[in-house]
Image: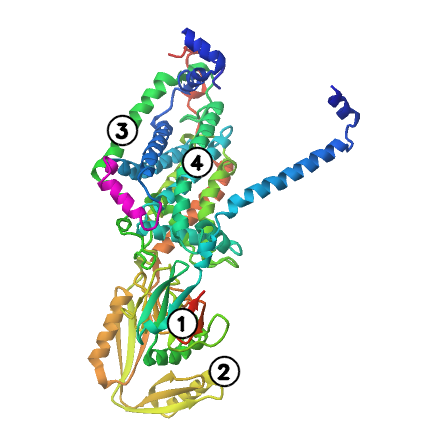
């Protein structure tokens, strides 16, 4: 009864009780948000997953003309030790008509912008069309990678030359950590 | 709708219970005395089948979880062990896998039923929307569940779908990593997908409860779409609807059993029997059949729309295709519920149903496949036989002037009497111009049904001519073609036109057929018979 009387007495006016309602609701909202956040954030990549977000590769184990496929952040990456012929072809084709023009030197650049070494090419191994993993040489008319799914053909610099893919194979961010070692990521 | 409860507890125990927890009363009012329209046809039996499917999926799923290991190296083997070693594991696993397909089969028929008879119109908007929520949850559950066997299609399907979210601007990448729990589909992903796959069916069960509640509040629609006017228009749920539902469900279970026992893997993809390999992609990645129409809509967008790139446009269109169902009650302006009395809408509806099937077909095809083309691929080769070949270097003063220099050199060679020229660039500003003077010009045109055949024919000509010609000029011609993608675009257009243009306008313009007197007027002269 007392409450009803109080409401009618202050009809349409701001009361101290209104302030308490608003303050209470605000604190509750913040409290609920703070409680929910850990339950949302727990789904983000965990510390061990993030720790694995870089991959070290020992280049001395890769002879010339060979490549290794390593997993970086769970995705395949090609580390290719190119031959002189492949390097020459890649540099010559800098001026060919390209779908996604980029020079070979640009594609060798390290993460920090330093120039790379022409014999080492580090590429993300997913076709830019629909994400298939291309194979080396087999089927490629440009001596590079060929995607068996829909026939995208990449040259020795991993640039798209023919087929449905819109872009060049992505370069994986990498750094030389020693004369024969790189870190990807 | 149901009116006051007619339940009367007969024994002492039920009277005691009724005072404390009237659960028998609730069941009696909902599934025994509940009045259903007399004229319901067999399209109204799919709700019962869907309840049956949900129970089957939950029961078999709980059993499967007892044997399944959500781990990247063990998941595939644990499913194989279930099929081979666990007593009756083969049966339970098959029921669960086939059950998902049967669930979607029934839900699609249920949804088309609602569309045709206007079951989404007032006062059943919320009933319809709750149904759409259930469908959306089913899609999510189906997708999560398909990932769990960890075969190639599981893995790459999950990769493609999570990558779709990456198409969203700014936040896409973070959301994608949040969902995967890493930077690719991996152990955290399979773990959480298992957890959520176990959770969602119970959420579905909860929303089904709301769905049935809303249904019993508004009352069932019926094939004529005219509201039930009196008790004489209805029959009690038991035995009339229960027996009819039971009969229809029995037929449904027979179909279910045919798949489970005779072709349990017919609805799945063979590639899912290869363990997941992040280093190797299957030649084509396709979802399960029930998601193919949406996959076709996703892939129909191979062009950019202003600032929206093709990938994002496809993702938005795919979600919009389901989203549009939610607002359907307000898009259809017709006051007539049942399409039985909407002759024009009925024709558009039939086209819509065909379009949905065709979209499903497109979703399973390679998007670049050519359905129709105006002619074969062709190419014209020109070369010069005999003649003098001359080479000269081109030197431009800077890369920017390269093209001018090359053009000038070519023009010069032509002016000198060369019949063919070719330029090869060797550096930023250097190149070689080769030209042929004299000799006899030759031309040949080759054709091929596909580009691969055409290239083969071109190579054949080159080999035949061999060393006689220093170089060739090849002009390739692609005929105008109609691909699977083009077909999907036409179908997608109709899908959205149907909801966004045809239904809103048609509702205002169409003249519905007259409701027959047998429905509009009381044939018994106002003296209604009691419900039998």
| Residue on which the image places disc 1 | A181
Q: How is the image coloured?
A: rainbow
Q: Which residues are magenta?
A: B70-90
| Residue on which the image places disc 4 | B134
Q: Chain of mark 2?
A: B
Front of the two marks 3 and 1: 1
| Callout 3: SS | helix
Quadrant holding the C terminus of chain B: top left
Neighbourhood count class around disc 2 (C-alpha, 10 Å): few under 14, some 14–19, many 20 upward: few
Q: Residue at x 25, y 85 (%)?
A: B469
| Residue on which the image places disc 3 | B251
CA distance separating discs 4 and 3: 24 Å
Q: Is residue B375 above or below residue B48?
A: below
Q: Nearer the viewer, residue A180 or B51?
A: A180
Check residue B204 for magenta coloring: no
Q: Chain of mark 1?
A: A
Can residue B335 be seen from the camera position used here? no
Check residue B86 for magenta coloring: yes
User: How far across and down, in percent of the image, does residue A139 sit?
Assistant: 27, 69
Q: Nearer the viewer, residue A158 or A180?
A: A180
User: How far across and down, in percent of the image, does residue A44 sit?
Assistant: 49, 51
Front of the two marks 4 and 3: 4
| Residue on which the image places disc 2 | B400
């Amino acid at each position: 009864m007392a409450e009803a009387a109080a409401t009618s007495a202050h009809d349409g006016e701001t009361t101290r009780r209104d302030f308490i309602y608003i303050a209470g609701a605000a604190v509750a909202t913040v409290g609920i948000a703070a409680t929910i956040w850990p339950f949302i954030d727990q789904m983000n990549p965990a510390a061990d997953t993030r720790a694995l977000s870089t991959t070290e590769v020992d280049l001395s184990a890769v002879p010339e003309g060979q490549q290794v496929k390593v997993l970086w952040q769970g995705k395949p990456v090609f580390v290719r030790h190119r031959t002189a012929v492949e390097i020459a072809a890649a540099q010559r084709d800098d001026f060919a008509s390209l779908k996604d023009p980029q020079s070979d030197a640009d594609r060798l650049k390290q993460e920090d912008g330093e120039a790379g070494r022409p014999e080492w090419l580090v590429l993300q191994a997913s076709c830019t069309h629909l994400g298939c993993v291309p194979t080396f040489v087999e089927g490629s008319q440009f001596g590079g990678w060929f995607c068996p799914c829909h026939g995208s053909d990449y040259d020795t610099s991993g640039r798209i030359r023919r087929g449905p893919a819109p872009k060049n194979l992505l370069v994986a961010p990498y750094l030389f950590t020693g004369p024969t070692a790189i870190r990807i990521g | 709708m149901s009116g006051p409860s007619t339940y009367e507890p007969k024994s002492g125990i039920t009277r005691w219970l009724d005072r404390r927890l009237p659960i028998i009363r609730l069941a009696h009012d909902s599934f025994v005395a509940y009045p259903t329209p007399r004229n319901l046809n067999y399209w109204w039996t799919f709700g019962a089948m869907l309840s049956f499917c949900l129970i089957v999926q939950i029961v078999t799923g709980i059993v499967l979880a007892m044997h399944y290991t959500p781990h990247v190296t063990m998941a595939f083997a644990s499913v194989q062990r279930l099929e081979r070693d666990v007593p009756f594991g083969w049966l339970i696993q098959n029921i669960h896998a086939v059950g998902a397909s049967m669930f979607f089969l029934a839900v699609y028929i249920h949804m088309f039923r609602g569309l045709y008879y206007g079951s989404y119109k007032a006062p059943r908007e919320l009933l319809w929307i709750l149904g759409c929520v259930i469908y959306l949850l089913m899609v999510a559950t189906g997708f999560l569940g398909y990932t769990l066997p960890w075969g190639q299609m599981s893995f790459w399907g999950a990769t493609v779908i999570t990558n779709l979210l990456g198409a969203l601007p700014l936040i896409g990448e973070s959301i994608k990593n949040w969902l995967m729990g890493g930077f690719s589909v991996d152990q955290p992903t399979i773990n959480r997908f298992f957890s959520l796959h176990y959770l969602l069916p119970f959420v579905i069960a909860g929303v089904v409860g709301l769905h049935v509640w809303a249904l019993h509040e508004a009352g069932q629609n019926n094939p004529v779409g005219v509201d039930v006017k009196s008790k004489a228009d209805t029959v009690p749920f038991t035995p009339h609807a229960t027996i009819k539902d039971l009969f229809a469900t029995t037929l449904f279970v027979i179909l279910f059993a045919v798949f489970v026992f005779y072709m349990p893997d017919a609805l799945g993809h063979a590639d899912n029997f290869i363990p997941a390999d992040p280093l190797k992609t299957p030649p084509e990645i396709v979802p399960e059949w029930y998601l193919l129409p949406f996959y076709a809509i996703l892939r129909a967008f191979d062009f950019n729309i202003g600032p929206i790139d093709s990938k994002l446009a496809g993702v938005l269109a795919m979600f919009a295709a389901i989203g549009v169902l939610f607002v359907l009650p307000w898009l259809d302006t017709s006051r007539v519920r049942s399409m039985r009395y909407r002759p024009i809408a009925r024709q558009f509806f039939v086209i819509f149903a065909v379009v949905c099937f065709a979209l499903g077909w497109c979703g399973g095809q390679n998007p670049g496949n050519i359905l129709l083309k105006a002619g074969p691929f062709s190419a014209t080769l020109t070369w010069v036989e005999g003649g003098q070949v001359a080479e000269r270097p081109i030197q431009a003063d800077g890369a920017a002037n390269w093209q001018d220099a090359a053009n000038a050199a070519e023009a010069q060679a032509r002016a000198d009497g060369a019949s063919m020229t070719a330029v090869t660039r060797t550096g930023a500003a250097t190149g070689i111009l080769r030209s042929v003077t004299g000799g006899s010009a030759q031309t040949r045109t080759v054709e091929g049904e596909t580009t691969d055949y055409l290239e083969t024919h071109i190579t054949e000509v080159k080999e035949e001519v061999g060393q006689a010609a220093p170089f060739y000029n090849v002009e390739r011609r692609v005929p105008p073609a109609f691909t699977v993608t083009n077909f999907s675009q036409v179908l997608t257009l109709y899908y959205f036109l149907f909801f966004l243009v045809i239904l809103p306008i048609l509702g205002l313009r169409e003249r519905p057929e007259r409701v027959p007197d047998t429905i509009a007027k009381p044939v018994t002269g106002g003296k209604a018979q009691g419900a039998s």
